[in-house]
Amino acid sequence: MKKFFTAWLAACCMMSFSACQSADTRQASEGTSVTEEQAQVEAIAGQLQNKMSEQERNSVSVGKLTLLDDENNAEVSNSDNHIVEVELWNNQDYLKWTEENKDMFSEEEYQEKIDFYSSNAFTSIAGVVIDGRYYTGFMPTYDYDGGEITYYVDDSISVDGELTATEPEEFHFSTFEEFSIWYRDYVDKEAEDGYTTQAEADQLYEDMLIIFNSVINDTYEILDEPAKNHTGESDFKSNWEFDSDEVTEIQDSVSEISIYDEELDTTFLVHVTLPPDFDASQTYPMFVMTDGVWRFGDHPALWNMMKNEEAEDVILVSIGYDFELDGTDNAVRAIYFCEKKDLFLNFITDNLMPYLSECYSIDVSQSGLYGHSLGGVFTHYAVCHSDLFENQPFQYYIIGSSAFWSPYFLPNEDNPPAYQSEYGYFDRNATFNKTLYVCGGEEEDADYAEYYGENDSTLEGISHFMQRLEEHSVTTAECRIYDGANHYEYIPDMFREFFLKFYGKS
């Protein structure tokens, strides 16, 4: 990022700095020969082979739903209730730091700073932590009240190792609202110029609003340690979005599974919701959703479709991250859906689904995997690589509003991007034996128009994907564009329609 500092403090800122079964039950089953009935169950379950390591198996813990344990529920997550902690420095702190780091400055610079800090008494915000994350954006002044503010932005850049210095440009704003409009454009330009990613820019802008409003309203807390000591890990339980009343009604049917993956070095939080009349001796399809931070909130409506006998019984599964990761952060989502999508697919195919098949009898011939936006990019990747796995846990793949234009996705691809040839699936296979449900919202292209660049928009990407499938004579793909809907609006209707079509009771 480029350097920035407030006018009144320009000098000082320029130096800135468990298991599904009990152990006894499992041991007994491991020592028992496979009966004909068990063999039939394994055949229905697709005989998924569990490839978890011993460490991964030992990491699993199963318990009841914890999202309702305290007040960190949907009502809080939809509010502006953020924890803002600030590190305060006064002129004596800056003076001490400068003296300790004298070698960083020329003789003239050093003396200027010593003179300034010795003769000017002030307090400033030297660092900020928001919801456990270290903030790296523009800082408000210590006593900022929402009125005038001035920043100087230094556009110095490094070219071939040499710093090209320019005179800092002054930006003066009469109100916080005026500054906010400018800052939105500023971070977007930073992303466009490659100084940061768009998701990081979006997060920076949102964090800026939080810290400035906290200072204006005097709602922050004082840190007793350096802000930079914070790694960014925190409890992001409050970011999970769901209706607490609806979840309370089904909580007795929900299990919460913590499961670690070595390759990704990540602990996932998986919620399994059993159908209303679950019978452990019966076999059920399993419907798996990525983005558990949002999709767990869809469990109650689908569960009620089963209760009302509109749909056959299905085991619902949503995959989220433990509370130390913010599943709503696109920078986090991009890691698993794009940057390390191969490892995430391995986790689902060879670890999670085989593990769940040891807990429940799963009919993989009717099981499905769903992802939306970046998750839709991942679901497309998953189905296009399904032929490379011995385990075949899914028949249905639901690709929702796949963001093929995503800045996180395209740089990881060849030129042209490999997704445009379905990652060579049709070079390896003469036929396509999976069922696809591809969907989007009629009005959603406008939602992210500023990000498309020369790439397809969301709906264009869907259209071109369907054309390619037609060219390969794929007859098991359906596309549904929902009238008048934006990027996320149609999801509840899509779930209902999908369940009525594929799991509906006649």
Image (cartoon, rainbow, N blue to C red):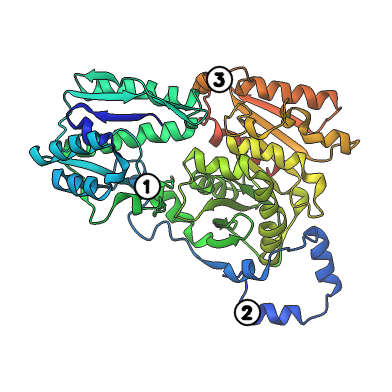
x%, y% of residue 102? 26, 45
x%, y% of residue 32? 79, 81
Q: Residue at x 36, y 41 (%)?
A: 78
The quadrant the C terminus occupies is: top right
Q: Earlier in the sequence, mark 2 or mark 3?
A: 2
* Mark 3 element type: helix
Question: Is 502 or 157 nearer to us in this picture?
Answer: 157
What's the mark number on residue 23?
Answer: 2
Which residue position is annotated with label 1?
A: 133
* Residue type indicated by callout 1: Arg
* Mark 2 element type: helix
Q: Are marks 1 and 2 in contact (CB under 8 Å)?
A: no
* Mark 1 element type: strand
- Of all residues shown, which one is farthest toward the front? 107
* Residue type indicated by callout 2: Ala
Which residue position is annotated with label 3?
A: 445
Question: Is 115 or 473 nearer to us in this picture?
Answer: 115
